[in-house]
Each structure stands twice: as structure tokens, then as C-alpha cells.
Image (spheres, rainbow, N blue to C red):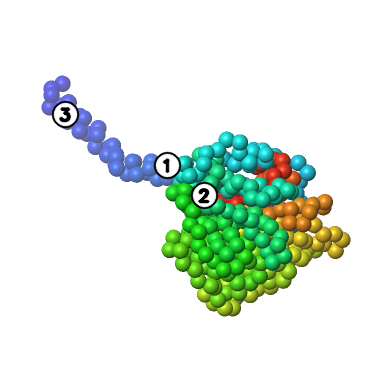
Amino acid sequence: MSHNELKDLLEDASAAVQAPSLAHSSWAHARKIKRRRYAGTAVAAAVLPILAVLLPAVSPSPPPVVTPTPAVLAPEVQQLPSTMPERLVAPLPAVGADLVPSDFQPLSRHPIDAAMAVVQATPEETGDQPQPIYALAPDGLWVQIDVGDLTFTHDEGGNQAAPLRPLSLSPDRRRVALPQPQAVVVVDLTTAKAHRIAVPGLNEQVAWQDDTTVLVGAGGPGASAVDWAAGTIAPLPAALSLWDSVGFRDGTFIELPATRRELRTWHPDEATPVRSTGLTDPPGYAVNEWYGSPITDGARVVRGSWGSTPTQGYEAIAVVGADDGVVERVLDLGPGRWKGCCKPLTFLGADTVLVQTERDAVIAWNFRTGAVQVVTSGPFSGILSIRAP
């Protein structure tokens, strides 16, 4: 068979066979796959609502609720514990007997930059001259104030008192004001010089208005303002009692009259109080009488007191709001103490005060928490004037 004959035979055979459509076949296959996917999706869509009905709803676990711990405040009337931990407040000695130093330098030869404490013992037998006065420098050095030629103060009845007063140390801790009959002596610790300024009157009490002005007075209302550097004196119009008052940095004074139920704010140049506020006692307790010198941090006044409940009375230290007269805290010192036994000395931090007692020379009381610690243990019979840095 020739080549031409073979070609003609193949053309005749293929004429009866239809040509395939490749594009049509491909699209048809794709539609089959797509239908299978849609069918699977439809089944899943139909099953999910059924599962949602049959299975319980599971929500994510909520975060744990954290309840903040409430601030724990000590009760308004706090009890002095029977035992107290010790606390070191340098350079104060740890034992009351050491408040009368055996090792000291004369101030006249060893001036100091400042004092944390000034101390004068008051023995039962006073003798002809007052006991020495010592100043404790921040580095622990004791110096004896050997300048000023001091004598006892006395009231109209002739009752004598030591020259050192609880508020004798100036706010900057560089000077000591000592009342004297018809005068006041201001000792500059930085120069070891004594400045004597004539002030009419018995002059039993002092209180600093600022670093240059000290108020000097006797037992009753009325005082004189003394500029120790200039040596000038001016009677005050204010009829405040220095026994019951403490000065603020702005020049005003807060007074807690000894037997009156009020708190008074004075400006020394005004004859009447700027404000008078009644006292508000804690529930079940009453402050009946104040004694000793008050101290302040500018917002609160702290003072020794005689307090009572419906069943008993006791010595106490009380904290009073300077603006509203609210007795915020009371430290009940317990029975068996003599009147005037205990007095605040200075603030030590925001809510802690140092207190002098007749059983432990110095204790630290945090009136916010009620914690009490012994700073200087054992009794000390004398006057302390302390200003913490």
C-alpha cells in the first residue's frame, strides 16, 4: 500500500469520531468538586446549630476578684502595752541615766552646729543653784552650757522651777531660750555666746515664734516677743497663755486652754483669737484637763492630758486636729501615775511622737497604728527639750 492510499484510509476512519472538548471537560470536573465542597459546608452549617442546642454553652473563666485589703487603723483610744520593744533613735542614749552625761565638753570651748536634745536634771533637793544644762549634738557629743549665769525661775508664791523649758530649743535647733526673773537668756550654740535681754516679769515660760523671735511669759495670759539678735522686746496684744500654746511656722499660735473645752488660734498681733473651736472627744472618752507644753506638726497638736471614761480616769497623751478640734487619738497611759507624769517632746516622722514618761524616759508612739516602743529606758527626773531633725 502506497503512502497516499494509507492517508486516505485514516481520514475515512476518523471522520466518524467526534472531536473532544477539553475546556468543557475541565469545567465539568471543577463543578463536581465545587458541589462536593458546598455540600460539606452545608452539612457543617446544619450541624452547628444542633450542637449549640445539645451542648451547654462554655464561657471563658472570669478573672479572679481581688478584694483590696482595707487600711487597718488603730482605735481612737489606744492602751499603753505592758511590754514594749526597744527602738534606737540616735544620738539619744538607750538608758535614762545617761541623759546626765559623765563625759562632756564645755560649750564655751566646743560650740556645736545644732542640738537634738537639751537636758536638765531636777532632783528632789534643788540646792542653791540649778543643775547643769547639757546639749546633745547630732554626732553624739555632749556639751555643758557653761555660759549665761542662770538661776531658778519662780512664780508669785515663790515656787522654784528649772530654767530649761520643754520648748526652749529653737526650731532650727541652734539656740536655747531660758527664762529668768526679769530677763530671758538666749544661748547661741554655734558661737557659745549668751544673749541676756531684759524682760519685765517673772518669766516662767518660753515658746519660739520662729528662729529669731521667742515669746516669754509667766503663768497667766500675756507674753512679750523678744528678738534675741537685735535685743528688742515688744509686748504682745494677744492674751494667750504660753503654758498652753505652741507656735506654727506661719507665726500663728494654737492654744489648748488647760481647763476649757476649746482650741483657739491666735495671731500674736491681734487681741482676740482668730478662731475658736470646740473639742470633739472619741466615743466614751473625755479630755478633762491639759497639762505640759503642747507640740505640733502644723496639722495636729499633741499634749498631755487627764482623761476619763464613765468608770475611771487616767493620764493620757492626746492628738487634736489643729483645724477642727477633733481629738483624733488618745494614748491611755494607765492608772497609778502622778499628774503631769508624761508629756510629748517632738514629732518623729509623720505619725510618731516622742513622749517623756516617769517610768521610761522616752517612748515612741505611732498614733496611726498604736505601736509603742522604748527609746530611752528607765526613769529620768528632769526636763527634756527635743527637736528631731
Q: Position of residue 304 (x, y in %)?
A: 70, 58
**Which quarter of the figure has residue 178?**
bottom right
* Residue type beneath disc 3: Lys
Q: Position of residue 89 (x, y in %)?
A: 59, 42
- Give the label, 1 or 2, closer to the camera: 2
- Camera-nearest residue between 248 and 110: 110
Vertical arrangement, residue 121 with respect to residue 252, above or below: above
At x 64%, y 50%, the residue is 129
Q: Which residue is mark 2?
A: 147
Residue 7 disc label: 3
Separation (CA) of disc 3 from disc 2? 148 Å
Q: Which residue is mark 1?
A: 33
Tell me the quadrant of the picture where the N terminus can be found. Answer: top left
Q: Are marks 3 and 1 in contact (CB under 8 Å)?
A: no
Numbered circle sitting on residue 386? none
Question: Of the residues shown, which amino acid type is indicated by label 1?
Answer: Ile
Instruction: State the residue at coordinates (32%, 44%).
Output: 24
Residue 278 makes an appearance in the image: yes
Name which residue lies at 74% across and 53% down.
Answer: 341
Q: Is residue 371 shown left or right of residue 112?
A: right
> Which residue is outermost to the front?
128
Say which amino acid is labelled 2. Val
Q: What secondary structure is marked by label 1?
A: helix
